[in-house]
């Protein structure tokens, strides 16, 4: 069995590439960074637990990829570009085949977000992955608290596919499985939104719950028009009668949800169009607090489930 | 049962106090920091697992305290002052009494190192605590790789008490239990050493193993004089025949081990004396690679155990 230090050296050191700002990467007691004076540092951490955040049968490549992207997504939601990551990996044994595949998934995700691994820790125990993400931005960050009455609400992609992947039908659906296992942090979108949006969050716990955080932080309410909510193609009504529910309250989408003041809508739309990126208008910020989903006939609709909470007594 | 968001709000938000550099603390997708242009950022992460890094019966106060200090210690070893921490907490249920005690221990440790909690994540699963530590320093960091032939080797405190605490005799020893459960990150010492030392590391896996890292990184060897190795008072030969072994290869001491060039020794010693802090000279850096422990009669001594490795097949 590999010793801890060999293990880190062999699998993770190659992911620590030279990059601007990094004075020292792995191998000492801490990593060292120089943050340019005109840049703000954004930092976030998220843990993924086997059986809770991903099915036990998930491949090590996908586990690593997702763990990194989930954290990159938090930075994206602030308008920050991912730059550096730390990995705290707890695993039951040091299986070199598993580690090799895990490192491959991590490398793919790092390349996709143009970032590097600068440090970490490996411990023995039940499989769990905690990643710390550091990114930078210039100017004001995108907060949850900036939504204003009259702002329009947008989302950067179609919803529900990852939640569908966990249903019996979705287990056989390749597109749904890809959405679940290979989420994409929308950091390029976040960089554009940083210039135009009044607020943003990433959709990790489901549209309803995450929009709820924005509304609470901003002290406003919202109307969401159901006909405008973009539902993932793999989730048509034919195969999944719950598609709307999954799009509204399923988790793991990692699209950005944002609000734009009416005067910024055209600039944002054209910036997105230029980069060939999607931006769907789904509703409006209103004064009356609370979140209302509105059907085409004007009636209100209440989703059965309202997103993910690790400590809800029903296990949701 | 408390929901995740209430739980974070109630127990951890009070630990996020205003401080210089923090633009935004908890409550959004990421925390935001401003790092002054003349300061370097040091970042580290460490995981503590119940049953591996602390006995299952450890109190939640002590678990939190130690988890924070272990991470602060990594910063101290770089010569960085701890400033900000993130907590990724995985726990089997959200017991408010446990959480309250855990938050108390965290608050005590944060106060001791004069830092704040700026973010984190809570997840459900087997108890595990991952902390990310961020600190700053001005000038050059203390690296493992700077030891030079002729440098003298020092340690900032007496060793072996924490390892003794895990022995049958040590379980009844209050001083040993305090050493194990309430380690002190030597960040004040680290700040002094940053001005004078040529290399440093914190003693987490045992003197022999951690000094080994310095020697390997610096491409040098060392002679340690056994009579000079400071052994914790609670560990006299009367009650513990293994005291020397525990001081050399027991883990969890969290003292700083450093090397000083002969011309810096007096300045460092007087700076330590002025602050009423200990500094024990224990050996010399030599050209011949390898680590030699030397008895008073000049004979070499080889410790039975050479420190802690999570993935050694013997479970050590």
Image (cartoon, coloured by chain):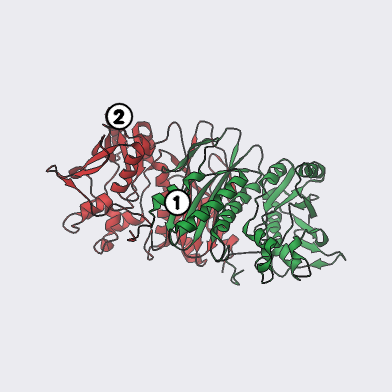
Chain colours: A red, B green
Q: Is residue A291 left or right of residue A80?
A: left
Q: Is residue A26 left or right of residue A208?
A: right
Q: Nearest the camera: B211 or A197?
A: A197
Q: Is residue A65 left or right of residue B315?
A: left
Residue B51, image x, y percentages: 55, 66
Residue B50, image x, y percentages: 53, 64
| Image quadrant in which the C terminus of chain A is located | bottom left
Residue A80, image x, y percentages: 43, 39
Q: CA distance from mark 1 to mark 2?
A: 33 Å
- Location of residue B193 (image quadrant): top right
Residue B133, image x, y percentages: 56, 47
Q: Is residue A228 visible?
A: yes
- Location of residue A202 (image quadrant): top left
Question: Which residue in the structure is indicated by mark 2?
Answer: A264
Nearest to the eye among marks 1 and 2: give it: 1
Q: Nearest the camera: B20 or A242?
A: B20
Secondary structure, mark 1, is strand
Neighbourhood count class around disc 1 (C-alpha, 10 Å): few under 14, some 14–19, many 20 upward? some
Question: Which residue in the structure is indicated by mark 1?
Answer: B121
Residue reaching furthest to the top: A263
Q: Residue at x 35, y 60 (%)?
A: A313
Residue reaching furthest to the left: A297
Q: Nearest the camera: A59 or B183?
A: B183
Q: Say yes or no: labels 1 and 2 on the same chain.
A: no
Q: Is residue B265 left or right of residue B178?
A: right
Q: Residue at x 70, y 64 (%)?
A: B249
Instruction: Look at the numbered discs 1 and 2 and tell me whether their residues touch, using CB distance below 8 Å.
Output: no
- Residue A315 against residue A298 in the figure, above or below: below
- Residue A120 against residue B243 in the figure, above or below: above
Residue reaching furthest to the right: B297
Which chain is disc 1 placed on?
B
């Amino acid at each position: 069995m590999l010793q801890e230090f060999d293990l880190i050296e062999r699998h993770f050191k190659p992911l620590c590439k030279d990059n601007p700002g990094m004075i020292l990467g792995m191998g000492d007691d801490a990593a060292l960074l120089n943050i340019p004076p005109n840049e703000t540092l954004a930092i976030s951490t998220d843990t993924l637990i086997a059986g809770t955040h991903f099915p036990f049968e998930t491949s090590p490549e996908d586990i690593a990829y997702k763990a990194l992207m989930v954290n990159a997504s938090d930075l994206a939601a602030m308008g920050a570009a991912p730059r550096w990551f730390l990995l705290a990996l707890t695993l039951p044994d040091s299986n070199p085949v598993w580690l090799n595949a895990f490192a491959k998934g991590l490398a793919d995700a790092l390349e996709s977000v143009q970032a590097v691994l600068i440090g970490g820790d490996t411990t023995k125990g039940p499989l769990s992955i905690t990643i710390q993400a550091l990114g930078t931005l210039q100017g004001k960050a995108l907060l949850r608290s900036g939504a204003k009455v009259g702002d329009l609400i947008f989302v950067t992609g179609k919803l529900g596919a990852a939640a569908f992947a966990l249903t019996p039908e979705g287990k056989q659906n390749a597109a749904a499985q890809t959405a679940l296992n290979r989420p994409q942090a929308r950091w390029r979108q976040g960089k554009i939104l940083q210039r135009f949006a009044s607020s943003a969050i990433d959709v990790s716990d489901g549209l309803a719950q995450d929009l709820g955080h924005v509304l609470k932080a901003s002290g406003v309410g919202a109307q969401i028009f159901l006909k405008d909510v973009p539902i993932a193609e793999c989730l048509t009504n034919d195969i999944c009668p719950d598609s709307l529910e999954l799009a509204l309250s399923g988790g793991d989408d990692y699209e950005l949800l944002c609000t734009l003041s009416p005067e910024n809508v055209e600039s944002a739309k054209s910036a997105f169009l230029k980069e060939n990126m999607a931006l769907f208008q789904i509703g409006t910020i209103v004064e009356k607090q609370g979140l209302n989903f509105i059907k085409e006939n004007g009636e209100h609709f209440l989703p059965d489930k309202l997103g993910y909470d690790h400590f809800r007594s029903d296990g949701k």
